[in-house]
Amino acid sequence: MPGDRHVLLLADKAQRGPVDDVRFEFEALAYKVPAHITLVDTDEGDKVNAATVMRVASKLFRTLIRFDRIQIVGERNVWLMADEESTAWVEGIRKELLEGKCNPRIVLGRGKDRAEAERIREFAMQKLKLPCVMEFSEVLHEEVLSDGSVRVIGKFPLKPDQLVQQ
């Protein structure tokens, strides 16, 4: 029986410095999963096949995404949120993979309660100097197996922007 699948848009390693500083401090999964935006979450990943992910990723260029706020969601989740224009761009990619909206964000951490989430948010505000821009350079399609391990279905580096390369 296949495990849960997801599709991630990965931040370029060279761009992750300050975000990783926050994530390594407060996000338990930061050492396993790099900073990313989830395009298709595990609860709907079985609706997207590998050929579709490859087709969509092959059309994409490396891109800059602007983040303009840090939000506490629920009582303890701290998210770095994409601005309106970047959100529209990411939702366009999502629409090619699967109908429905996504919420373009990077998880910065999870507090044990609201007070700790506020402390994480303050720490992140000082580190990140909003608004901040990050380059995203790869699409990752994975399957999370029942034992918690991960199997890579496909890694798709995004094309360099031709205008930038000239």
Image (cartoon, grey):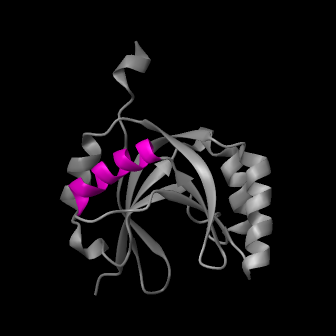
Q: Is residue 58 visible?
A: yes
Q: Nearer the viewer, residue 67 or 1?
A: 67
Between 136 and 102, the residue placed more toward the observer is 102
Asked if 11 appears above or below 34 in the picture, the reply is above
| Residue ID at (67%, 77%) | 76
Compare residues 20 and 95 and report the one nearer the observer: 95
Q: Is residue 97 left or right of residue 142?
A: left
As for residue 77 lying within the magenta part, the answer is no
Q: Is residue 93 magenta?
A: yes
Where is residue 142 drawn, in percent x and y? 38, 66
Dominant secondary structure (helix, strand or loop) of the stretch shown in magenta: helix
Q: Residue furthest top?
A: 166
- Extent of the magenta region: 84-98
At a point 67% along the width and 43% down the height, the residue shown is 130
Could you tell me which residue is drawn at 50 percent across and 47 percent down?
A: 83
Using the rendered view, name the quadrant where residue 75 is placed: bottom right
The N terminus - image quarter: bottom left
- Which quadrant does the C terminus fall into? top left
Q: Is residue 99 left or right of residue 102?
A: left
- Regarding residue 156, the answer to whether it shows in the image is no
Q: Position of residue 162 (x, y in %)?
A: 35, 21
